[in-house]
Amino acid sequence: MHNCREVKERLTELILEGRSDSELAAELNTCAECRAEFDVVNATLRTTTRVRETAIPAETYWPGYHARLRDKLSHVQVRRRKENTGASFAPLRLCVNFLLRPVPVPLAAALLVFPLLGLLAFQSTRKPAAPQSVVVHVPVTVPVVQEKLVTRVVYRNRYVPSRTSKRTGADSRAENTFAKSQMPRPDDVPTLAGFKPAADVKLTVIKGGSPNER
Amino acid sequence: MADDTELIKRAQAEDIDAFCTLAERYARRIHLLASHYCRNQQDAEDLSQEVWLKAYQALQSFRFDSSFYTWLRRITINAFLNHRRSGFFRRQGQTTAVQLMPLDSETLSESSLASSPENIYNKLLFDSVVDALSELTPSQRLAFLLRHYEGMSYEEIANAMNCSTGTVKKGVWRAITKLRARLSTESESQEALTSLANEY
């Protein structure tokens, strides 16, 4: 049974491949619609074939085209030769590129400063070479300081009134009177007249002493 | 005249003259595809020359397993598809009605524009073909060109373009549909123009 859709799908193949299909041709003869479709597609493709030569520029265009192409090819060849030449120096170039590559400013500063600091530290720790030492025996007279023992016994008031305790005015007056009586009088203070102090002073503090203890 | 094999061997030894001779042999075929693929002459030249540069760089890998043109066509397809991926054609407007062609004196003297009315008509038809093809996706356009102009089978095209046979068939069919619509409109307007000219 004739199927227009199926025939139309096969039309393109038939025309593009340029082969004759007797069965399809018979079907085209029986269906006017398919025949018209075939004619239109065939005409379209023949037109595109006919005008395709129009796409090719005139003969005068080609010398310029090939000159431009040759120019580009020459550039490619030069670049390729440079690459080939450069390939033998690849490790050296790699090193140079590594050394010349851009470095961030803080990193560059650190690279400069740290070696300098290290050098300075090394210089400071290094002692200058000591000359050959010569032992010289020189007798030295050392003055001996004569020791004089001065003993001053200081009594500390053991009964310091507490701040928090509540006392009457009479008690505190009596206590003050007692403390004053215990303080040394000015005429009792031993003087240091005529004493020449030595370089060292020896002070002995006796803790926990009382007026009755020496 | 040296055959392809000899020229290829010389070109592989970095003989530019030999490679240019090869280019002169096949440049028209490559340029024809590029002209249908691109919308203007300058792009077509850039694309076709890029094909030759890629071919020159890859020539060392040619092992004489196939004909030179088959190998070159594979490079052409890849170059076209890479141009598509790089957005080379996207910047060209799909609805541009007027195209700026290079009109230097050299081209004008022998170009089809300066020739007979038949050539002018063919030029207009060709513009219509290119316009119709530009409405397709680059893959569909390339599939049609390879099928119609290069005579490649659907399987070969699918293999070269890394897609299914069904995709290729669909692309070719869509191209023919577009061309049919555009060219029928063109022929109608041509008939109208002819009748109008006859009246005067």
Image (cartoon, coloured by chain):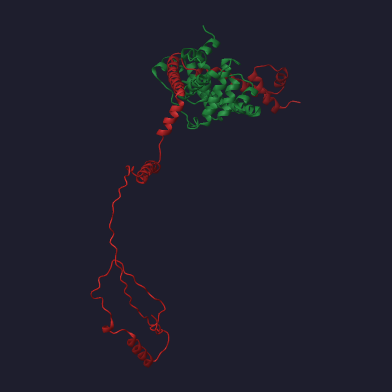
Q: Is residue A95 above or below residue A116?
A: above
The residue nearer to you, when weighing A105 against B3, is: A105
Residue farthest to the bottom, as pictured: A170
Residue displayed at 56% across by 26% down: B141
User: In the rendered image, is residue B195 in sight?
Assistant: no
The residue nearer to you, when weighing A182 against A103, is: A182
What is the letter of the green chain? B
The residue nearer to you, when weighing A136 against B185, is: A136
Query: Chain A colour?
Result: red
Quadrant in the rendering for residue A75? top left
Locate the C terminus of chain A by quadrant: bottom left
Q: For this view, does A1 lie left or right of residue B21?
A: right
Residue B100 on image: x %, y %: 43, 26
Quadrant in the rendering for residue B167? top right
Residue B180 on image: x %, y %: 58, 25
Locate the N terminus of chain A by quadrant: top right
Q: Is residue B108 above or below residue A146?
A: above
Residue B83 on image: x %, y %: 51, 28
Q: For this view, does A22 lie left or right of residue B175?
A: right
